[in-house]
Amino acid sequence: MMNILSKLLLILIIASCSVSKSTKTMHPFSGESVGCGNFIIYKLAEDNKEYVSVVVDVSTIELEPRQSYGIGKSEVVKVTRKKYDSEISTTLCNDVMPNKRPKELLEELASDGTVELVISPIELEKAKKDEPYKATVILRKVVFETVSIDYLRLENINVGWLPG
């Protein structure tokens, strides 16, 4: 009887170990969010040497309070990941560049996933008047060659303006 109980306990332990998987999103983008241009948003890694950018061609669409685009299925949205050898944040959305620019180590275009745009009615009115406005971007199941982003929300980022 003890032998059967021991085997059953062993099976339960093995089964519980094989089922437990981490569902935590593992990506480096936990730094600052920066927005500029007609619609360019950067989400930096904590070390400021890497970012994911979301570029939306707002000249080809009519902005709505909520809209979604499939990455690789629409020319409207482009999601890129770039990595550099040193800090990059001061060069983003800035028309004054430092003398020595960081060296680009990696560039990857997202091949799959969804980009959702959320713009409040008040901010949408500003956009229609060609004024700067705030937008929220939600990335879901974004796939790059070397990393994936299950979920990333970039909240109330200023866009619709040009540096300078």
Image (tube, rainbow, N blue to C red):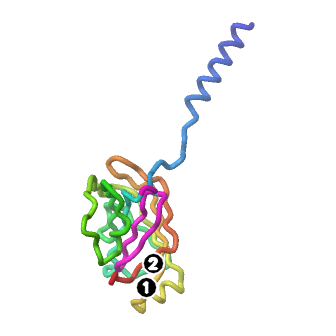
Q: Nearer the viewer, residue 120 or 133?
A: 133
Q: Return the mark for residue 158.
A: 2
Work out which quarter of the rendered image holds the N terminus and state it: top right
Q: To which quarter of the image does residue 16 belong?
A: top right
Q: Which residue is mark 1?
A: 132
* Magenta-colored stretch includes residue 38: yes
Which residue type does callout 2 highlight?
Asn
Residue 83 percent location from the top left of the image: 32, 55
Which residue type does callout 1 highlight?
Pro
Residue 103 percent location from the top left of the image: 25, 57
Per the image, label 1 sits on a secondary structure element best described as loop
Please tell me whether residue 16 is drawn above or below residue 73 in the rendered image. Answer: above
Neighbor class of circle 2 (other Cα within 10 Å; few <14, some 14-19, many 20+) is many
Residue pictured at 39% horizontal, 82% vertical: 160
Per the image, label 2 sits on a secondary structure element best described as strand
Work out which quarter of the rendered image holds the C terminus and state it: bottom left
Neighbor class of circle 1 (other Cα within 10 Å; few <14, some 14-19, many 20+) is many
